[in-house]
Amino acid sequence: MPARKIIITCAVTGAIHTPSMSPHLPITATEIAEAALGAAEAGAAVVHLHARDPETGRPDQSPDLFRPILGLIRQRSDCVLNLTTGGAPSMGVAERLRPAEVFAPELASLNMGSMNFGLYPMLARVENFRHEWEEPYLEGSRDRIFRNTLADIEHILRVCGAQGTRFECECYDIGHLYTLAHFADRGLIEPPFFVQSVFGILGGIGVHEEDVLHMRRTADRLFGGDYRWSVLGAGRHQMRIAAMAAAMGGNVRVGLEDSLWDGPGRLAESNAAQVKRVRGIVEGLGLEIATPAEAREMLALKGAERVNI
């Protein structure tokens, strides 16, 4: 039998890490686009995108900041563009939704529940902050709820669904799978569901092998053959959890949004470096990575010609 195709997603720069944490974190539109293109060339079929203020590096959901990133990538690659609707935990849902609402991408991330989202342990890893917003942003996560109410989720499903956008359903805990099942039962989201199981965020499920298996078993029971499973492990757990999932035929997500590391005590110098490492794991298992065209077919996406970019 031919090898199973594994979709590699690369999350290029998210809202978790601050510029002070790594000199390799892309900040400007050109840096983010070049990082995404490097990841695609290394084997990522999907690139997951946030934007940042080019002066301060702060996460920013302004469509005008996304536009040059998307344009530069589209000129040189056919990879699937996946826009965040998560933004940052400090943002309201209307602000977070704007890029997906404006650009109608093939794929958008969708957080499947409200939760604690503890970033403050990262404070111990930074001696000097470059920007005044960084320390209070991390410290504020002690007393901040990442809001994703049922009403918020339904609103995003209706707005993006009307444009033909499909979803990377980010499930940080078991209950989030049941939330997805609820909206599927109501017909607000249709299979195949792209379930992104997230491990290792303080406030969500842990990183033990049993946690990974529990997520997979529960998704199998709820969705049967109607979903595509993918995983991301936060921080130093990234490659270990990716290897577990790939061995089970799951898809994988890597990138500097999720982890700044490329080995013990060694910062990743690029998103492409992480993609190459996980590609080596996938191919070492005798599996093949999916091309963008194959990913589009696997996820039933509408096609790049139907986006507003």
Image (cartoon, rainbow, N blue to C red):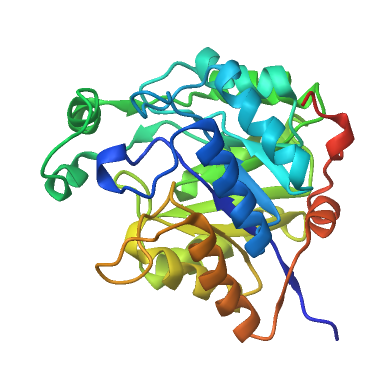
Using residue 248 as the reference point, say whether residue 304 is left or right of it. right
Question: Residue at image x 73%, y 59%?
Answer: 224
299 displayed left or right of 27: right
Q: Residue at x 75, y 45 (%)?
A: 76
Determine the image quadrant of residue 70.
Answer: top right
Residue 27: x and y in percent read 43, 35
Viewer can see residue 221: no
Which residue in the rendered view is the most extreme toward the top?
Answer: 94
Residue at x-position 51% and y-position 40%: 31
How many badges with numbers are in the image?
A: 0
Identity of the residue drawn at 32% across and 37% down: 117
Q: Position of residue 182 (x, y in %)?
A: 64, 36
Instruction: In the rendered view, tell whether residue 250 sits above or below residue 144.
Output: below
Name the quarter where the C terminus is drawn: top right
94 sits to left or right of 17: right
- For residue 217, which quarter of the picture? bottom right
| 274 with respect to 266 (left or right) | right
Q: Nearer the viewer, residue 222 or 50?
A: 50
Which quadrant: the N terminus? bottom right
Above or below, 56 against 215 in this view is above
Regarding residue 291, the answer to whether it shows in the image is yes
Q: Residue 108, image x and y in percent?
A: 65, 35
Q: Residue 187: x percent and y percent?
A: 78, 31
